Image (cartoon, rainbow, N blue to C red):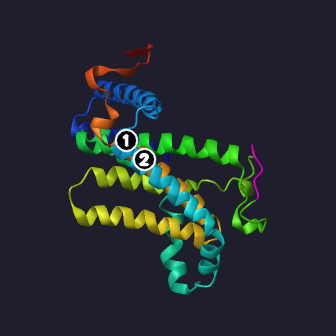
């Protein structure tokens, strides 16, 4: 198997004339861009524009509303199990799972190997979105320590600083990943049908996590909001890039690393 992949990569290089040095240069630039984006994302929390502030406030209200009806949504989901819904809502086994991460890696690799700048850009944005949204969600999961619905401990049970899978319900990681990816993809197309398809798929993931009794409704709303905001940030140049080159800059190479901040 190892020799198969080595041969495949060699064939790709020879057909598409993508040199090793080109790949190294592109990867170095993208690694630097990844960390620069992370720094700008961190500082952006202190400088939300008005539309983002309104969206953020709306998200908090939605999370609160979701929390108030967690039991009702759980009961509704449990009463509506069927073979059709089982098949439809098995989407969370693929989208929002580790298979999505493999797909993202494949997308970026395609852009690098086939010298497709558009695909490479989208691949990098999805990596940034999932990476940073995933960090936020993982940290919150551990700090909050909310019990999952299947433990039957109730929605009010919190055990802060918890690493147990059964007590890291808030927020939903699948919802975070699905909405992070969907938002990046939707922002990179002008096709309304594709936008609806992207957000429709991630909404099904939200429903699937509740349907499978893995998360409370408010968990999925929070995860979706995190994925959306981070995905929107990394895929919009006017948000991602600081005016006049201000902000954090991270440059990486195989023999050097530099970090700077311009005011």
**Residue 121 in view in this figure:** yes
Q: How many marks?
A: 2
Residue 62 higher or lower than 211, as above or below: above
- Left or right of 41? Residue 10 is left
Mark 1 touches mark 2? (CB < 8 Å): yes
Disc ID at residue 233: 1
- Report the quarter where the C terminus lies: top left
Closer to us: 179 or 3: 179
> As displayed, is residue 135 above or below residue 211?
above
Q: Please provide percent x and percent y for residue 224.
A: 49, 56
Give the quarter of the image for residue 25: top left
The x and y percentages for residue 78 are 64, 80
Mark 2: give few (<14), some (14-19) or many (20+) Cα within 10 Å: some
Q: Residue at x 41, y 29 (%)?
A: 40
Q: Main secondary structure of the magenta part?
A: loop
Quarter where residue 143 is shown: top right
The stretch drawn in magenta includes residue 240: no
Q: Quadrant of residue 33?
A: top left
Magenta residue check for 158: yes
**Label disc, if present, on residue 229 of the rendered structure:** 2
Marks 1/2: CA distance?
A: 6 Å
């Amino acid at each position: 198997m190892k020799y198969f992949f080595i041969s495949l990569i060699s064939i790709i290089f020879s057909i598409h004339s993508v040199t090793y040095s080109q790949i190294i240069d592109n990867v170095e630039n993208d690694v630097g861009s990844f960390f620069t984006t992370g720094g700008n994302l961190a500082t952006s929390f202190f400088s939300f524009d008005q539309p983002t502030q309104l969206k953020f406030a709306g998200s908090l209200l939605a999370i609160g509303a979701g929390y108030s009806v967690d039991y009702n949504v759980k009961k509704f989901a449990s009463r509506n199990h069927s073979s059709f819904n089982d098949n439809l809502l098995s989407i969370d086994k693929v989208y929002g799972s580790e298979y999505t991460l493999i797909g993202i890696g494949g997308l970026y690799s395609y852009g690098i190997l086939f010298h497709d700048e558009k695909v490479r850009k989208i691949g990098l944005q999805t990596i940034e979105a999932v990476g940073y949204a995933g960090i936020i969600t993982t940290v919150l999961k551990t700090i909050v320590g909310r019990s999952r619905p299947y433990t039957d401990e109730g929605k009010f049970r919190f055990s802060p600083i918890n690493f147990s899978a059964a007590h890291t319900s808030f927020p939903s990681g699948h919802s975070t990943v699905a909405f992070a990816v969907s938002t990046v993809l939707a922002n990179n197309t002008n096709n309304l049908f594709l936008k609806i398809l992207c957000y429709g798929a991630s909404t099904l993931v939200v429903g699937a996590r509740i349907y499978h009794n893995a998360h409370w409704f408010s968990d999925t709303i929070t995860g979706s909001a995190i994925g959306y905001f981070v995905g929107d940030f990394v895929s919009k140049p006017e948000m991602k890039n600081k005016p006049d080159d201000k902000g954090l800059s991270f440059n990486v190479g195989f023999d050097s690393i530099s970090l700077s901040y311009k005011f």
